[in-house]
Every structure is written in C-alpha cells, then in structure tokens.
Image (spheres, helix red, strand yellow):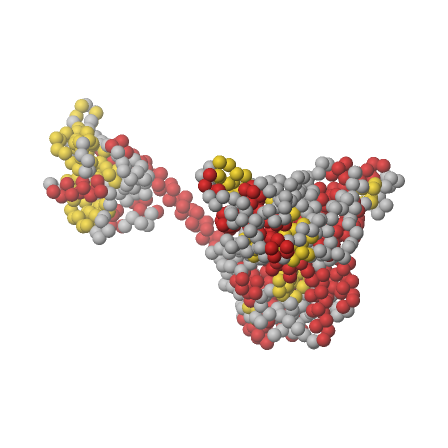
Amino acid sequence: MIFRNDRDRRTPVARATDRLYPLLPLRDIIVFPHMMVPLFVGREKSINALDEAMNHDKMILLAAQKKAKTNDPSEDDIHRVGTLSSVIQLLRLPDGTVKVLVECKRRARIKEYVPNERFFQVRVEETVDVIGDPVEIAALKRSVNETFEQYSKLNKRVPREMILSAMTLDDPSRLADTIVAHLNLKLEDKQELLELPDVGPRLEKLLQLMKAEIEILQVEKRIRTRVRKQMEKSQKEYYLNEQMRAIQKELGEKDEFKNEIQELEEKLKAKKLSAEAREKCEKEIRKLKMMSPMSAEATVVRNYVDWILSLPWDEGTEDKLDLEEAERILDSDHYGLEKIKERIVEYLAVQKLVERIKGPILCFVGPPGVGKTSLGKSIAKATGRSFVRLSLGGIRDEAEIRGHRRTYIGALPGKIIQSMKKAGSQNPVFLLDEIDKMSADFRGDPAAALLEVLDPEQNHAFNDHYLDMDYDLSRVMFITTANTLFSIPRPLQDRMEIIRLPGYTEIEKVQIAKQFLVPKQIEEHGLKPDDLEFTTPAVLRIIREYTKESGVRNLEREVGSISRKVARRVVREGHAQRDRVTPQAVPHFLGVPKFRFGVKEEHHEIGMSTGLAWTDVGGELLNTEVTIMPGKGKLTITGKLGDVMQESAQAAMSYVRTRATRLGLKPDFYQNIDLHIHVPEGAIPKDGPSAGITMATAITSALTRFPVRRDVAMTGEITLRGRVLPIGGLKEKVLAAHRGDIHTIIIPSENEKDLKDIPTSVLKNITVHLVGHVDEVLKLALIVDEPNHLFRDAPDDVADQIKVVAPPPPPPAAEIPAPAPVIEVTKH
C-alpha cells in the first residue's frame, strides 16, 4: 500500500505496467482480490485466453461483462476494471468445457486492447490500494465488523468461522474485499466497490450496503414471524373447536357431524344399490366415523358417499308401449323423418314382447337445422322416459367423460354420471349432441372413452374414475347427433346405428312452416292467429329467395322477422287489421331477395356444363367452365379444387384425348392449344371425384363446339376407359337439381338403388337417365345436328339405346306442383 500525504488529503496511486495479459470476460460474477474461485469456461475465446496464460506465467485478467446475456462481447461490453488472477488448476471436461481454479491477486484497470483474433489481449495498469487517515480507517473497520456480525445473525448462510476470520484481519482493504464476497448484493454495487481504489470510501460504501441489506432481512424476519403466529392461531382454533365439541357432547347438545353420519346410514339402508356399491359405501362410512369433521379427508369421503347415494341405481320410468300414441306424438312434433319414427316404434314393439332389451344406440347424421336435437326430446316424450342432453362440442379431455380420480383436489365424476344423476332415472333418453365436434389433445381422447359408453356389450359395467365401480348404462337409450361422419372414429361408428336425416324438400319445408313454424312464431311474438296469415306461395318464395339451407332454421328466422314487424303494427294500431303475407308482399317485409332461385343457364352454352355437388348443408349446383386458347398443350385447373377433383379433371382430359378421332378431332389437337378448366365460386374449397363426367362433357363441348343442354345436370366419377362409377349423396344432389329448376339429370347406373330414398314429389318433375359410359353422357348432354354425328364410328346399338326425353315445363313459382305418380327413368 502507498500513502501519499498532501496535508489532510490522500490520493490513490496507479502503477502502470507494460505487460500484456489475456482477458477472460465473466458473466454473473464479480471477483475480488484474495478470493479463490472455481470457474467453468465454455466460450472459445475464453478457453484460448486460458491456454495463453498457462503457456506463460499463468496470469490472466478477470473482468465482468456489463450484460450477462451477451454471448460474444465486444470491448465496450466489458467493464474497464477487473482483477489480475493466477491460474491454480485447469481441467478439460469431456463436453469441451474447461474447469479452472483461479486465485485473485490485485485490482487492475484496462489501458488498451491489443488486436488479437484468438482471444482478448489487453495492456493494463495495476491499481494500488491507498490508505487515508489511520484513525478514520480504524473507526470504519470497527463499524464494518460490528455491522457484519449483525448481518450474519440475520443471514444464517454466513458461517460463524467467517465472522471470526474477518475480525482478525488487520488489512482494511482485504477486510472489505473479504466481506463483500459474502453479501447478497447486486452486480452493479459489487463492481462499484471493485472500482474504488481508496480504502476509506470503499469501507463507507460497504457499510452503507450492509445496513440496507440488514433492513431487508429484518422485514423478512417480521413477515416470517407473522406467518408463524397465524399458523399457531389456526392450530389453537382447531384445539378449541375440539374442546367445544367435547363439552357439547357432555352436555348432550346436538352433534351435527354424528347426525350427518346417521342420515347417510339411513339413506344407505333405504337405497337399493349393487353389491359392490353397498360394500364401498359401508366401508367409507366406517372410515368417516373415525375422522375428525374438520379434516379435509372427511369432506372428500362425505362427497363420495353423497354421489353414490344420489345416483339412480334401480329407479326408472315405465315405458309407454302404446304404439299408436307414440306415432301420434312423433307426427305432431316432426314432419316427415319416417325412418326414425319407424325405428322408435319398432323398439317399443319389441319392448312390449320382451321383458327387457338393451337400449338402442342411434346416431342421427344430417345437415344443420333438420331437427336432430329436437327429435331426441320427442322420442323421450313418446316413450315416456326422462330426457337428458350432453353437448360434446369442443370437449377434448378424456376426464370429461370418465371423471377424475378422487386423489385430485376438487375431483368430480364425468359428464355421463353427472347427467344420470340429473335424469334421476336408470333408463332415460340420453342425447349426446354434436359427437363429431370432439377433439383430442395431450389429456386424452374423449372419443376413446365413449367406446365403452356406446357399446351395448360393455356399458352394463361402465367404470367412472371417480366412483371406481361399475355402473349399469345398458337400459339407457343413447341418441347421438352429428353433421358429418368423417370426423367420427371408425370404431365409434361401428357401435352406433347410423340413421341419415337428409335435407328437406321444398314441399316438406312448406308443410313444416305451415304446421309448426308459423304457429310457433305467432305465439312467441304475442300475436293472435287472426293477426297474421302466410299464403303458401309466400312461404315458397321465402324458401327459394331468402334461405339457402337443408334445414329450416333460417326459414324460422325469416318468419320471426315478419312476425316482429306485424307485432309493431299491432302495438300501434291494434288487432283490427289482418296482415296477409303474399309473394308480392314478401320483399316489403324482408327486403330484397338474398339468393337466386333456379340458377340454370338462360341459353345452351359451349364449354359449360352443370354438375351436382354434396355439401354439409345439402346439395348444390356446380357449374364447370372450359375455354380453349392457342398454346402448347397446357392444362390449367382453377377454382380452389382439391387433389381428388384435379385428378378427375386430368382423367377427363385423358379420356377425351383417347376419343379424339371418334369426336371428329385431330389426334394431336392438344399440342397447339391450352385448356383452362374453372369451377366458379373460387373462394369455396371443392373436392371429390363426382364431377368427372361434368368436366368431360364441358371439355368435349369446348373442343367440338357443340353446346351443352342448359336443363341437364349430371354427377358421376370417370375412369380412363370412360366408365361412370357410382357416387354418394344422391338424394341431396337430386334435391339441389329440383331447387334449381333442373328437369333432367344423369347419374351412374349403379346408383339406381338410391332412387327409392328420393321423395316421389321430387322425382315426378325430373327425368333420370342411368348411364354406365361417358359416351352415353355426351349423347344426352350435347346438342348435335344429327344423333349419330357425335360418334362417327359408334356402334349402332349405342346410338339406338340413347333416348332423349323432353323435360316437362317448369311449375309456376307461386304454386306448389300437384302430386303426380309418374316417374320416368331411362336406363342405358
């Protein structure tokens, strides 16, 4: 140490050296002289710096980074003051890092950086500690030792030996550096102490920081004491409560807990349970008697026993077995849906003959708004059973079905058991709504849990995780609803009886509106039957021009909108006037039409054909356009089509190329033209193979310049050999053609069996052509000058078998067509 007197002022002295030292940047640590520190080094530059030190005199400068997260620091990212240290031991680890033990010697300030690509190399000037007034230093030493002793009493992490060692140090600089290493200080404060060469200010700063830390430790001690007192208070309250219970027992006062146990025992005696459930209840009640009523476990046991006793184990409703009454109830609530009504009546008939049968598991699949959910209520009403509904939309946790185990805090049974408790009956009608909207994640797959619930061979012993015992679900009539089947796992589909609910026809929608929707809306809006009347043509116009759906939800909304406007008029003017809704008055109530009805082409077009498509909300007309341009044989397909539909377009083009000669085209016609196939409404995704013959017809029309009939719609998959394969969703597609005023449709011959599902009222105005080859489709769809001009070398039997049937005139828009029993089907 150096003392330089200038009257009462002492100044530090720096001793410059010309030596170069390697620099090791430190992260999250500040080292002081006289410390022995182990370090783990992983950065390449730092390892090179250690190697450089080991090759010379083992001296290295340790300086802290300003930001610890900087992986590749620059000169400005490192503090200018560090500690010159000696490497005592160096060990290379298998992962490439280096463990090094260093002994810190003395402070040093970086004078300049010397360029070196392998590591940081610096020229330093060593800082020599400067001692001020000896009396002042002695006073500061005493204060620091006393404060450190006080700090160590509050912070138990400081060993007692460290306090004794600090008191024996005579060097004030070493005292400050030794104590600061054991304080819980910020890195900025430690760096500030390292940069102070004058021992007096350094001791003053250390004393200030220790007192601040002591204040924090004292506050923490007060908080710990307060928490401990609160815990002791809770224990004291528990002890006093137990004493009060003992006093009440001696005085003969009411013991609520004992009475509660007696009440559970009485319920258990009166309840008819399975042998397993009774045994578990008796065991849990015996356990409950030995517990303290204030314990958390007692609450869990009480809830468990309550759940078991509240479930319907043997309670049930008696089925109504009057078949005529059941049919009357189903018909009064829903129009149509004959298959479902027939299935329910069949179940009741079997129930009447057999004492007990397993409950059916039905799955209603259909577009939104066709009455799947409301049908479940009608079935419960017709059979005389209680009704319970569980929505599965958005459920992604298997525990929602099976429940949680009792070991979890707040555990409850699954939704199945909860719904059975709500039903209060062992044989309710249980509706599982939107079964296709479930999903799975890391918590499990609820669809897998439903495999046991919906299996008649397993659900007599359904095991909920919370109850941990078998519960009989075999008498439950399970009904599930879905919009589509593709999102339901195949094993789950296999356990259910699938019943499809197709979209309603216009005739059915008119009847539903007249019989159900209009009376319901009139009543809900506070009107009288004499206040509002809907004519049949008006309802038909609402269906055609203001709704576009397979169900009747939007139709009900539009009827409700008209009812609200009439209600406003009734409030203002009274019931004297009667509003009669006619087709001409509909725009007055509902505004301009929202949809076009009968969207078929006004003229026969070249390169445009009309296809039939199936969607989640029913069938749709799907136009296909083809245009030809000069080019080099490129085929462009647009309209946001899926992979399957694009492959159908390529198959159609390949078929046309193979038939070029018979179509009157040159064999190499495609080499000088580009073809563009487009399906309008390009924002809507489309996919599926059923548009194959539609695309082949449009391509042929564009190439041969023969127009396509505007009143013909078609559907069918095409093969490279020209065969027409069967398709699905025929009923919805035929209904779409009926709504679009199409009177001739072409379908695969293998779909003839599906025509029986289509209402007679629809088929009476449509001519159906059954085809097995694309040649037959082109004969029917294209307008040619001569019947045999299209296929010049076609066999006579193919040309003779084609029968062109003139479609009947379209019905007037304001009338419902009268029923006619004639269905004309031309088979090829």
Q: Is residue 298 above or below residue 550?
A: below
Left or right: 7 as drawn, with respect to 500: left
Front one among 606 and 127: 606
| Residue 417 visible, this orientation | no
Q: Quadrant of residue 217?
A: top left
Give the quarter of the figure containing the C terminus: bottom right
- Percent across and percent down for residue 208 are 32, 36
Give the quarter of the figure containing the N terminus: top left
Q: Quadrant of residue 72?
A: top left
Front one among 151 and 372: 372
Q: Residue furthest top?
A: 7
Left or right: 281 as drawn, with respect to 180: right
Left or right: 539 as drawn, with respect to 179: right
Identify the residue at horizontal 67%, vertical 64% (top origin). 429
Front one among 733 and 607: 607
Q: Is residue 225 above or below residue 448?
A: above
Left or right: 416 as drawn, with respect to 183: right
Identify the residue at horizontal 79%, vertical 38% (top origin). 585
Q: Quadrant of residue 703?
A: top right
Please count the marks in the image. 0
- Percent across and percent down for residue 733 are 64, 52
- Percent across and percent down for residue 359 are 65, 69
Q: Residue furthest left?
A: 56
- Percent across and percent down for residue 99 are 21, 48
| Residue 354 visible, this orientation | yes
Identify the residue at horizontal 60%, vertical 70% (top origin). 456
Identify the residue at horizontal 31%, vertical 46% (top origin). 152
Front one among 473 and 267: 473
